[in-house]
């Protein structure tokens, strides 16, 4: 009897590995680009033809390879980046698996030209479907150039999955732009079909890269984030930095999240989730901020050996990372909110553009309605928007472990999402001086709904209901967090008839309702009695309030109302607050509202993310009138 089981040939093994690492032209570009960065290149040039189907060429001026190394590099599991298994737990290079080059070589015609800076001549290796055809000396500048031709031409099963030239090139340019964002210190060029798409000279910092990429528009409407946390990890420092959009600028997909962990572009649920958390009550549901965020931490605090293409990573201190990202972003947004840096939308009388579907975007975007740097990044990515969004990377609610109060989650599935108009005009420099609401001079009320006031340099318009809602929301939340929700007994307890289901809901959540300041007791059958309300909401209709809260609770995952969900409950409760639109307010009431706005976080937005404050600069007004 002959054996049925046989060891596979290296060639087949490489092709199998290629299936994981190289699934389309962009992944070839990724591996080659990463190798160039690992070789300490100051310059990386990517040239492709026909979306990478005909040619992918990556040239760098990095460390190069000796003849022996170059030959070894094409062998499976040959790497200069790690030596022993413990190195796997502290990876500081982008590559380490030693399988990219042999995998790529197994599915194309590959030419590798490389020269170490110290050596007289370069070496050229030609390989075809993994077999080395020739090795020769050649003249070459120091560095490495890898050309990949006829990708997948001998692997029909793979070739079938390659999409159109624009789609494949879209993936490539997204990838290259992310690499360029990750490493502003490297000169990056991208050429497609002999046309230069990017030529981005090295820049000392991130906003410099954006500026270089896109002309003079400065990073005006992006708030800088820069925080170092010393206690967040069990060992070592965690740094969170980058640029994040002000809440007035939102996008309709998570592709606007550019997250780098130790300078590696990742799509990480934990971090994305933390970003959404940071913006949660500031942008409407279904809208996403634009974020270029770097998370730097000791290499041993993150496991990159989770996914062959290394898109996914795993943090050792998940809760610490999650909470720190939230804090870092919220801190910077909070400052921006107080500065009133959010918006000057009012004088833009044109209808705001509804964002087109991603594919149709591009030229259609109206530059006037998008802010400086946000617009810059937008343009930067216009050509690069591709279908990178994978299911599961949206604001789904992954279970995040850990003790942080706001980091515990439950899976409640999709929530209904509102849509809102596209980004607003935003031209204010983040350096504008602070806005103290209580110091504003009140001019009056307009339309029964808006408070008009002025500061020394601007006209300030406040949506009274939205602002009041935010005040109530923040107070309820603060009281709840400190477990001291003040209640006020009702003079006449209100008896309510509910459905059986609702009554059950009240019964199941009685303790939670109590903590929310709602004293509601079952009264036999479907009847419940409301005995007390949160003091903050004194005067509201108790039945309506309880019904709304019970409704909301019943939508929550199995009654296990966690903090995130509770915020939705606070928002519902805040909605019942007394100051409404179309209601006259006395000057005392206005002043007390303004004072309250100084005491809370995020006075500029209602708890659903709508704007509560619009600030118009006098100097802008002067311009309207040609002064
Ligand atoms: P890995 O990057 O995981 O080590 P690769 O197959 O991508 O594996 O590369 C194998 C080795 O070839 C690398 O470890 C490195 O030593 C060398 N190498 C690859 N590309 C370059 C380059 N552009 N410049 C210098 N050395 C390179
Ligand atoms: Mg590599």
Image (cartoon, helix red, strand yellow):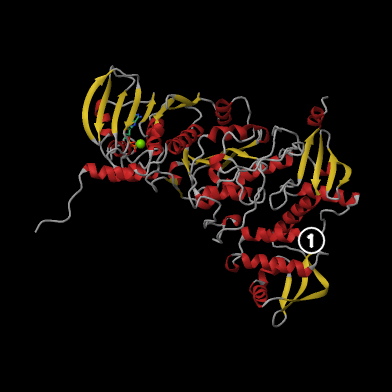
Residue 558 versus residue 144 in the image, above or below: below
Q: Position of residue 275 (x, y in %)?
A: 58, 47
Question: Considering depth in this image, is 620 or 531 the residue closer to the camera?
Answer: 620
Tell whether 90 sits left or right of 277.
Answer: left
Ligand 2 quarter of the rendering: top left
Residue 330 versus residue 491 in the image, above or below: above
Tell whether 186 sits left or right of 151.
Answer: right
Provide the secondary structure element on which disc 1 rests: helix
Quadrant hosting residue 439: top right
Please tell me how crowded label 1 is: few (under 14), some (14-19), or many (20+) other residues with Cα within 10 Å. Answer: many
Tell me the residue at 64%/34% (across/down). Answer: 366
Q: Position of residue 544 (x, y in %)?
A: 76, 67
Question: Considering depth in this image, is 167 or 99 the residue closer to the camera?
Answer: 167
Residue 149 versus residue 321 in the image, above or below: above
Q: Position of residue 307 (x, y in %)?
A: 39, 47
Tell me the residue at 53%/47% (across/down). Answer: 271
| Quadrant, the C terminus | top right
Q: How many numbered marks have been drawn onto this rendered protein structure?
A: 1
Quadrant hosting residue 43: top left
Question: Considering depth in this image, is 465 or 79 the residue closer to the camera?
Answer: 465
Disc 1: which residue: 536
Residue farthest along the bottom direction in this orientation: 524
The answer to whether any part of residue 240 appears in the image is: no
């Amino acid at each position: 009897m002959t054996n049925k089981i046989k060891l596979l040939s290296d060639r087949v093994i490489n092709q199998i590995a290629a299936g994981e690492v190289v699934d389309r032209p962009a992944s070839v570009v990724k591996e080659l680009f990463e190798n160039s960065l690992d070789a300490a290149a100051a310059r990386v040039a990517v040239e492709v033809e026909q979306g990478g189907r005909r040619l992918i060429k990556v040239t760098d001026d990095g460390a190069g390879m000796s003849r022996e190394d170059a030959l070894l590099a094409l062998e499976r599991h040959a790497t200069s980046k790690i030596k022993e298994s413990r190195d796997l737990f502290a990876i500081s290079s982008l590559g380490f698996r030693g399988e990219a080059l042999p995998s790529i070589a197994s599915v194309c015609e590959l030419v590798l030209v490389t020269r170490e800076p110290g050596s007289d001549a370069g070496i050229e290796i030609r390989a075809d479907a993994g077999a080395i055809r020739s090795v020769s000396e050649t003249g070459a500048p120091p560095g490495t150039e890898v050309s990949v031709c006829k990708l997948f031409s001998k692997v029909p099963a793979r070739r079938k999955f390659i999409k159109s030239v624009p789609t494949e090139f879209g993936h490539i340019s997204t990838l290259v732009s992310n690499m360029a964002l990750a490493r502003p210190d490297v000169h990056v060029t991208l050429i497609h079909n002999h046309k230069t798409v990017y030529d981005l000279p090295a820049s000392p910092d991130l906003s410099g890269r954006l500026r270089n990429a896109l002309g003079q528009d400065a990073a005006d409407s992006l708030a800088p984030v820069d925080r170092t946390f010393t206690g967040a990890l069990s060992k070592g420092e965690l740094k969170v930095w980058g640029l994040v959009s002000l809440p007035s600028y939102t996008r309709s997909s998570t592709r606007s999240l550019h997250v780098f962990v130790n300078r590696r572009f990742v799509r990480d649920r934990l971090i994305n989730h933390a970003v959404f958390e940071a913006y949660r009550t500031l942008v409407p549901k279904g809208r996403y901020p634009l974020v270029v965020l770097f998370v730097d931490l000791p290499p041993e605090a993150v496991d990159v050996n989770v996914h062959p293409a290394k898109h996914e990573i795993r943090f050792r201190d998940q809760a610490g990372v999650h909470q720190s990202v939230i804090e870092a972003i919220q801190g910077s947004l909070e400052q921006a909110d107080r500065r009133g840096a959010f918006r000057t939308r009012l004088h833009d009388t044109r209808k705001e553009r509804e964002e087109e579907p991603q594919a149709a975007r591009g030229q259609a975007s109206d530059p006037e309605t998008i802010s400086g740097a946000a617009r810059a990044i937008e343009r930067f990515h216009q050509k690069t928007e591709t279908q990178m969004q994978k299911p599961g990377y949206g604001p789904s609610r992954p279970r995040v472990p850990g003790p942080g109060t706001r980091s515990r989650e439950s899976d409640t599935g999709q929530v209904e999402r509102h849509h809102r108009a596209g980004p607003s005009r935003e031209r204010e420099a983040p350096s504008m001086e602070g806005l103290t609401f209580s110091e504003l001079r009140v001019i009056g009320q307009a339309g029964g709904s808006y408070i008009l006031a002025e500061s020394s340099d601007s006209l300030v318009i406040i949506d009274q209901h939205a602002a009041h809602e935010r005040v109530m929301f923040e107070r309820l939340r603060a009281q709840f967090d400190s477990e001291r929700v003040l209640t006020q007994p009702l003079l006449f307890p209100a008896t309510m008839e509910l459905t059986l289901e609702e009554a059950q809901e009240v019964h199941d959540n009685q303790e939670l309702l109590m903590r929310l300041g709602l004293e509601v007791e079952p009264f036999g059958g479907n009847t419940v009695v409301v005995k007390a309300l949160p003091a903050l909401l004194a005067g509201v209709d108790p039945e309506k309030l309880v019904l709304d809260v019970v409704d909301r609770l019943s939508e929550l995952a199995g009654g296990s109302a966690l903090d995130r969900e509770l915020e939705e409950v606070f928002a519902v409760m805040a909605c019942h607050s007394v100051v409404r639109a179309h209601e006259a307010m006395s000057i005392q009431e206005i002043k007390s509202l303004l004072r309250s706005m100084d005491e809370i976080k995020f006075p500029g937005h209602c708890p659903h993310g709508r704007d509560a404050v619009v600030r118009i600069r006098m100097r802008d007004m002067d311009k309207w009138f040609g002064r």
